[in-house]
Each structure stands twice: as structure tokens, then as C-alpha cells.
Image: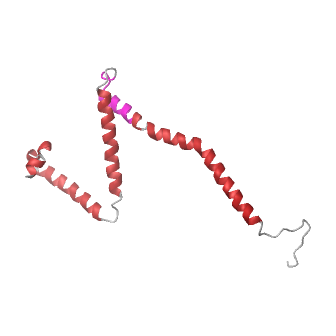
Amino acid sequence: MLMTIFSFINVESWSNAAWLGYGFLAGLVVALAVSSHRWLLLYLFGGMAYWLAVEVIQNILSGRAMLMDLSEWHRYVIAMGISWLPLAGWVLYRALRYDDVSQTVSQQRELEAAHYIEHTPVYDDDYQPRFR
């Protein structure tokens, strides 16, 4: 049954070293999944999803007539650049929005400070405390 399920990756031609290596890798992933560091799997799967997105973009670029003359390496570089565009847009958005956010935060701090001024004593300029 396993040979039927994994027939698309040609399991029957694997050597003993391949079985050992992939079994060790699967065991490590399972051990990580049951450990307290299972959050590391999110980085693993996130990296796989990112590279899958780069692969999809590269395959789309390979179908374009004007980019067919480029080497596969150049198409991967272009695909990675395209995949970074949303990150660059988000950083630019945050940088442009930062002034508004900082003004809002400073206004809120001023309001809180004004609230506490009412409860502090106000002295004249020539006030001298009795204790030294």
C-alpha cells in the first residue's frame, strides 16, 4: 500500500541510505512536534511555503516570452525580488504611518500627564521647604 501512495516519488528505487536518511528526518520532525519547541515547525513550514511561492512565481516567469531567454538562475532572482515587494510595501506603509502613530501616542501621554498635574501641589517660585 505504501508503494501505491508514494509511487509519484519512486520509493521503490530508494537505496538503504535514502530510507535511513528520510526516516531519520521524519523522526526528527515527529520528535520536534511532540517537544516543547514545536513552534520551530512554524518556521520550517513557513520557509517551505515561501519557497513554494517563489517556485510558483518562477514558473509563471518561465512562461513569459520576454523572460524565456533568461537563465533559470536569473528567473529565480527576479522571482525572489517580486516576492519581497509585499514586505517592502508593508515597511514603507509603516514608515509613512509612523508620524501619525507617534503623534497619537504623544497626545495620549500629554493627556495622561495633564490628568496627574491636578493632584500635584503647586508652589511659588520662592518656596523653601522646612526640612533639609
Q: Residue furthest bottom?
A: 131
* Front in this rendered view, residue 92 or 19: 92
Number of callouts in the render?
A: 0
What segment is highlighted magenta in the picture?
Answer: 67-80
Q: Residue at x 86, y 68 (%)?
A: 123
- Verify whether residue 28 appears in magenta: no
Counting from the top left corner in percent of width and height, residue 95 is at 57, 42
Is the magenta region chiefly helix, strand or loop?
helix
Quadrant location of residue 85?
A: top left
Counting from the top left corner in percent of width and height, residue 26 is at 21, 56
Q: Residue at x 8, y 49 (%)?
A: 3
Q: Quadrant of the C terminus?
A: bottom right
Quadrant location of residue 24?
A: bottom left
Q: Residue at x 17, y 55 (%)?
A: 23
Counting from the top left corner in percent of width and height, residue 112 is at 69, 61
Quadrant location of residue 37?
A: bottom left
Q: Residue at x 30, y 41 (%)?
A: 52
Q: Identify the image's colour scheme: rainbow, by chain, secondary structure or one colour.
A: secondary structure
* Front in this rendered view, residue 108 or 31: 108
* Left or right: where 98 falls relative to 117: left
Counting from the top left corner in percent of width and height, residue 17 is at 14, 51
* Left or right: where 46 falls relative to 16: right
